[in-house]
Image (spheres, rainbow, N blue to C red):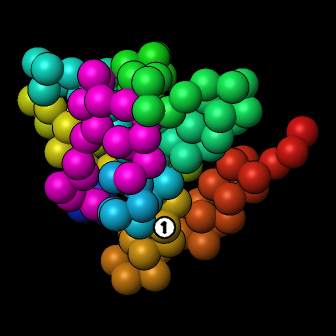
Amino acid sequence: MTTARDIMHAGAQCVGENQTLLDAARMMRDQEVGSLPICGEDDRLKGVVTDRDIVVHCLAEGGDPSRVKAKEFASHIHAVSADDDIGTVLRKMQEHKIRRLPVIDNGRLCGMISEADLAVAHARKNALSDKELASFVDQIYATT
């Protein structure tokens, strides 16, 4: 059985809940990623902020990313356990139409799964069938 741990990108870095969106944007640039998990001072996952959140929900609304804190984007968290199987990962991502999913182990962030990680799992590890990958892409990118 292929688990979330098998396909995740380990070592995901968090933006602190009290850091600014400008800090988050710089971290995204430096790490070449489009989203970051938000972690609290208790080292627990509080949410995820995306580059789109910064542009659409901060800048476009006249916000100052050097003053807006990441915790303002902490909301309901969609995550999976490191031991969840790949079917659970796919269902969660499809159900919520999300492209990046935090992976939790013992209450702490241990990695992230992106759509690219699913493609790699399909290509290298044969963890996903062609049908499963095609269904995922269809569900995530469906416009209706």
Q: Residues within 10 Å of mark 1 (few under 14, many from 20)?
A: some
Tally the numbered discs.
Answer: 1
Residue 74 vs residue 112, the one in the foreground: 74
Which amino acid type is marked by label 1?
A: Ala
Disc 1 element: helix
Query: Is 136 situated above or below 46?
Result: below
Quarter of the picture holding the N terminus: bottom left
- Residue 134 point in image, percent of width and height: 68, 64
Span shown in magenta: 9-26
- Residue 8 point in image, percent of width and height: 30, 57
Residue 112 falls left or right of residue 22? left
Quarter of the picture holding the C terminus: top right
Residue 25 vs residue 35, the one in the foreground: 25
Residue 45 falls left or right of residue 78? left
On the image, numbered disc 1 is attached to which residue?
116
Residue shown at 63% from the left, 54% from the top? 136
> Residue farthest to the right?
144
Residue shown at 18% from the left, 55% from the top? 11
Residue 14 position by quadrant? top left
Residue 28 position by quadrant? bottom left
Residue 38 falls left or right of residue 32? left
Residue shown at 61% from the left, 25% from the top? 63
Residue 142 in view (yes/no): yes
Residue 102 position by quadrant? top left
- Residue 54 point in image, percent of width and height: 57, 37
Residue 121 falls left or right of residue 56? left
Residue 128 vs residue 32, the one in the foreground: 32
Indicate yes or no whether the magenta region holds residue 17: yes
